[in-house]
Image (spheres, helix red, strand yellow):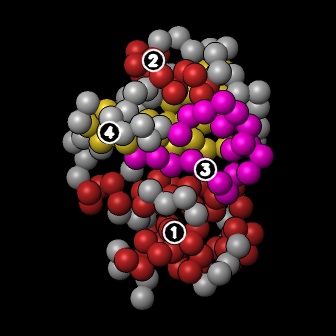
Amino acid sequence: MKFDDTSPIVVAGGDGRVLAENRPARRMLGPGTGKYCWDFVGQLKDDEEKIPCRDGCVMELLEEGMDCSQQTQFTINGKHNHLSCVPANGIVICMLRSDEGKTPAMMHSLTPREREILRLLAKGETTATAACQLGLNESTVRTHVERMRNKFSANTRAAIVAEGFRRGYLE
Protein backbone atom coordinates (compact mmCIF):
# COMPACT_ATOMS: atom_id res chain seq x y z
CA MET A 1 0.00 0.00 0.00
CA LYS A 2 1.47 3.31 -0.97
CA PHE A 3 0.76 6.62 0.70
CA ASP A 4 1.32 9.53 -1.62
CA ASP A 5 0.74 13.26 -1.58
CA THR A 6 -2.98 12.69 -2.17
CA SER A 7 -3.48 10.71 1.06
CA PRO A 8 -4.83 12.81 3.95
CA ILE A 9 -2.35 12.75 6.86
CA VAL A 10 -2.85 14.27 10.32
CA VAL A 11 -0.18 14.51 13.05
CA ALA A 12 -1.33 14.74 16.69
CA GLY A 13 0.84 15.59 19.69
CA GLY A 14 0.97 13.91 23.08
CA ASP A 15 -1.92 16.03 24.38
CA GLY A 16 -4.13 14.84 21.52
CA ARG A 17 -4.14 18.15 19.64
CA VAL A 18 -3.43 18.30 15.92
CA LEU A 19 0.07 19.63 15.26
CA ALA A 20 -0.11 19.48 11.46
CA GLU A 21 -2.10 18.17 8.55
CA ASN A 22 -1.25 17.95 4.87
CA ARG A 23 -3.15 19.69 2.08
CA PRO A 24 -5.42 16.70 1.28
CA ALA A 25 -6.45 16.51 4.96
CA ARG A 26 -7.25 20.24 5.00
CA ARG A 27 -9.29 19.86 1.80
CA MET A 28 -11.24 16.96 3.26
CA LEU A 29 -11.67 18.11 6.88
CA GLY A 30 -10.82 21.82 6.95
CA PRO A 31 -8.08 23.40 9.09
CA GLY A 32 -7.28 21.27 12.12
CA THR A 33 -4.20 22.64 13.87
CA GLY A 34 -4.92 22.99 17.59
CA LYS A 35 -8.10 20.89 17.53
CA TYR A 36 -8.31 17.54 19.28
CA CYS A 37 -7.46 14.79 16.80
CA TRP A 38 -10.46 12.67 17.81
CA ASP A 39 -12.76 15.61 17.02
CA PHE A 40 -10.95 16.55 13.81
CA VAL A 41 -10.53 13.08 12.26
CA GLY A 42 -13.68 11.85 14.01
CA GLN A 43 -15.82 14.21 11.95
CA LEU A 44 -15.58 11.65 9.14
CA LYS A 45 -18.95 9.95 9.14
CA ASP A 46 -18.82 6.34 8.06
CA ASP A 47 -21.74 4.24 6.91
CA GLU A 48 -21.35 1.70 9.74
CA GLU A 49 -20.05 3.78 12.70
CA LYS A 50 -16.68 1.98 12.68
CA ILE A 51 -14.37 5.01 12.99
CA PRO A 52 -12.51 4.46 16.30
CA CYS A 53 -11.94 8.14 17.16
CA ARG A 54 -12.98 8.93 20.75
CA ASP A 55 -11.86 11.20 23.58
CA GLY A 56 -8.32 10.32 24.60
CA CYS A 57 -7.58 7.80 21.83
CA VAL A 58 -4.29 9.55 20.97
CA MET A 59 -3.01 9.26 24.54
CA GLU A 60 -4.10 5.61 24.69
CA LEU A 61 -2.12 4.81 21.52
CA LEU A 62 0.95 6.62 22.84
CA GLU A 63 0.71 4.73 26.12
CA GLU A 64 0.50 1.39 24.29
CA GLY A 65 3.60 2.21 22.24
CA MET A 66 4.84 1.81 18.69
CA ASP A 67 3.82 -1.83 18.41
CA CYS A 68 0.13 -1.02 18.89
CA SER A 69 -1.35 0.94 16.03
CA GLN A 70 -5.05 1.43 15.29
CA GLN A 71 -6.17 0.06 11.91
CA THR A 72 -9.75 0.51 10.78
CA GLN A 73 -11.56 -0.24 7.54
CA PHE A 74 -14.80 1.57 6.92
CA THR A 75 -17.13 2.80 4.20
CA ILE A 76 -18.07 6.41 3.41
CA ASN A 77 -20.68 6.99 0.73
CA GLY A 78 -20.16 3.45 -0.54
CA LYS A 79 -16.36 3.83 -0.91
CA HIS A 80 -14.02 1.59 1.08
CA ASN A 81 -11.41 3.40 3.20
CA HIS A 82 -8.66 2.54 5.64
CA LEU A 83 -7.63 4.69 8.62
CA SER A 84 -4.24 3.99 10.22
CA CYS A 85 -3.25 5.73 13.45
CA VAL A 86 0.37 5.02 14.33
CA PRO A 87 2.14 6.15 17.54
CA ALA A 88 5.77 7.18 17.13
CA ASN A 89 8.08 9.18 19.41
CA GLY A 90 5.40 11.13 21.27
CA ILE A 91 3.14 11.79 18.29
CA VAL A 92 0.40 9.88 16.48
CA ILE A 93 0.25 9.92 12.69
CA CYS A 94 -3.19 9.30 11.20
CA MET A 95 -3.38 8.37 7.51
CA LEU A 96 -6.52 7.89 5.47
CA ARG A 97 -6.46 5.82 2.31
CA SER A 98 -9.21 4.96 -0.11
CA ASP A 99 -9.18 1.49 -1.65
CA GLU A 100 -10.79 2.84 -4.81
CA GLY A 101 -8.66 2.34 -7.90
CA LYS A 102 -6.13 0.02 -6.27
CA THR A 103 -5.90 -3.61 -7.25
CA PRO A 104 -5.66 -6.23 -4.52
CA ALA A 105 -2.24 -7.30 -5.78
CA MET A 106 -0.90 -3.77 -5.36
CA MET A 107 -2.45 -3.40 -1.94
CA HIS A 108 -1.24 -6.66 -0.47
CA SER A 109 2.04 -7.69 -2.08
CA LEU A 110 5.04 -7.79 0.24
CA THR A 111 8.52 -6.58 -0.64
CA PRO A 112 11.43 -9.05 -0.35
CA ARG A 113 12.53 -7.35 2.91
CA GLU A 114 9.01 -7.56 4.33
CA ARG A 115 8.93 -11.28 3.48
CA GLU A 116 12.26 -11.76 5.32
CA ILE A 117 10.91 -9.99 8.39
CA LEU A 118 7.64 -11.93 8.19
CA ARG A 119 9.58 -15.22 8.25
CA LEU A 120 11.48 -14.05 11.33
CA LEU A 121 8.25 -12.97 13.06
CA ALA A 122 6.82 -16.42 12.34
CA LYS A 123 9.85 -17.92 14.11
CA GLY A 124 9.08 -15.77 17.16
CA GLU A 125 11.86 -13.22 16.73
CA THR A 126 11.52 -9.82 18.38
CA THR A 127 12.15 -6.51 16.66
CA ALA A 128 15.61 -6.37 18.21
CA THR A 129 16.64 -9.90 17.24
CA ALA A 130 15.24 -9.55 13.72
CA ALA A 131 17.14 -6.28 13.30
CA CYS A 132 20.34 -7.92 14.52
CA GLN A 133 19.98 -10.92 12.21
CA LEU A 134 19.32 -8.70 9.18
CA GLY A 135 21.86 -6.01 10.05
CA LEU A 136 19.16 -3.32 10.26
CA ASN A 137 18.14 -0.70 12.80
CA GLU A 138 15.22 -1.65 15.03
CA SER A 139 13.29 1.35 13.69
CA THR A 140 13.65 -0.02 10.15
CA VAL A 141 12.21 -3.37 11.22
CA ARG A 142 9.34 -1.57 13.01
CA THR A 143 8.62 0.37 9.80
CA HIS A 144 8.44 -2.87 7.78
CA VAL A 145 6.19 -4.47 10.42
CA GLU A 146 3.89 -1.43 10.31
CA ARG A 147 3.71 -1.61 6.52
CA MET A 148 2.75 -5.28 6.74
CA ARG A 149 0.06 -4.37 9.29
CA ASN A 150 -1.34 -1.85 6.86
CA LYS A 151 -1.19 -4.21 3.90
CA PHE A 152 -2.85 -7.02 5.83
CA SER A 153 -5.17 -4.80 7.93
CA ALA A 154 -3.76 -6.59 10.98
CA ASN A 155 -3.65 -5.18 14.51
CA THR A 156 -0.98 -7.48 15.97
CA ARG A 157 2.16 -9.29 14.92
CA ALA A 158 0.36 -12.59 15.42
CA ALA A 159 -2.32 -11.43 12.98
CA ILE A 160 0.39 -10.50 10.47
CA VAL A 161 1.87 -14.00 10.73
CA ALA A 162 -1.56 -15.64 10.45
CA GLU A 163 -2.34 -13.57 7.36
CA GLY A 164 1.10 -14.43 5.97
CA PHE A 165 0.24 -18.13 6.22
CA ARG A 166 -3.22 -17.57 4.74
CA ARG A 167 -1.81 -15.68 1.74
CA GLY A 168 0.95 -18.20 1.09
CA TYR A 169 3.96 -16.16 2.17
CA LEU A 170 4.74 -18.75 4.86
CA GLU A 171 4.60 -22.55 4.84
Residue 35 lies, in percent from the top left, at 64, 16
**Residue wearing tag 4:** 75
Q: For residue 67, what is the image quadrant?
A: bottom right
Q: CA distance from mark 1 to mark 4?
A: 22 Å
Q: Where does the magenta region start and end? A: 52-73
Circle 3 packing at 10 Å, graded few (<14), some (14-19), many (20+), is: many
On whether residue 7 falls in the magenta region, the answer is no
**Mark closest to the chain's N terminus, 1 or 4:** 4
Circle 2 packing at 10 Å, graded few (<14), some (14-19), many (20+), is: some
- Callouts 3 and 1 close, C-beta under 8 Å: no
159 or 1, nearer to the observer:
159
132 or 67, nearer to the observer:
67
On whether residue 57 falls in the magenta region, the answer is yes
**Mark closest to the chain's N terminus, 2 or 3:** 2
Q: CA distance from mark 2 to mark 1?
A: 32 Å
**Residue wearing tag 2:** 29
Find numbered disc 1 in the image and state the secondary structure of the residue it sits on.
helix
Q: Nearer the viewer, mark 4 or mark 3?
A: 4
**Mark closest to the chain's N terminus, 3 or 1:** 3
Circle 4 packing at 10 Å, graded few (<14), some (14-19), many (20+), is: some
**Mark closest to the chain's N terminus, 2 or 4:** 2
**Residue wearing tag 1:** 159
